[in-house]
Image: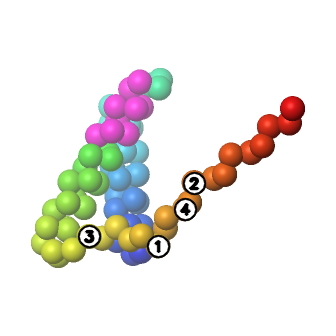
Amino acid sequence: MTDWELILTMFGEKATTDITKERNSQGFEECKESANIGGNIAKRARKDLEKNLGASVVSKENFLPKKKEKKKLE
């Protein structure tokens, strides 16, 4: 990961953790909502950064090819 990818990932995770704790989210649906909010905070930060830099901070270095399907035994 690039430095910015790592920073923004950590930023989203920390935002999600703090929101989950503040709201005392319980169960899948409440935690999912907290995660969406935290992820959107990081997304807005990334978009704002990219707008000001004039370039993407997401690299293509991390691309993983799709896994080949395993052959089924007949």
Label drawn at residue 26 = none
Point out the frontmost of discs 2 and 3.
2
Secondary structure state at the residue bearing disc 3: loop
Q: Are marks 2 and 3 in contact (CB under 8 Å)?
A: no
Secondary structure state at the residue bearing disc 4: loop
Image point (16%, 62%), residue name: 48
Residue 73 lies, with reference to residue 62, above or below; the image says: above
Examine the structure image and report whether residue 35 is included in the region drawn in magenta: yes
Q: Are marks 4 and 2 in contact (CB under 8 Å)?
A: yes
Q: Which residues are magenta?
A: 29-37
Amino acid identity at mark 4: Leu
Amino acid identity at mark 2: Lys
- Residue tagged 4: 64
Point out the frontmost of discs 3 and 4.
4
Please tell me which of labels 3 and 4 falls first in the chain: 3
C-alpha gap between disc 2 and disc 3: 23 Å
Secondary structure state at the residue bearing disc 2: loop
- Residue tagged 1: 61
Please tell me which of labels 3 and 1 falls first in the chain: 3
Packing grade of label 4 (10 A; few <14, some 14-19, many >=20) is: few
Point out the frontmost of discs 2 and 1.
2
User: Is residue 72 or residue 9 the one in the foreground?
Assistant: 72
User: Is residue 67 or residue 36 the one in the foreground?
Assistant: 67
C-alpha gap between disc 4 and disc 1: 9 Å
Q: Left or right of 56: which side holds 14?
A: right
Packing grade of label 3 (10 A; few <14, some 14-19, many >=20) is: few
Image quarter hosting the C terminus: top right
User: Is residue 60 or residue 31 the one in the foreground?
Assistant: 60
- Residue tagged 2: 66
Amino acid identity at mark 3: Ser
Percent of width and height locating residue 37: 29, 40
Image point (57%, 54%), residue name: 66
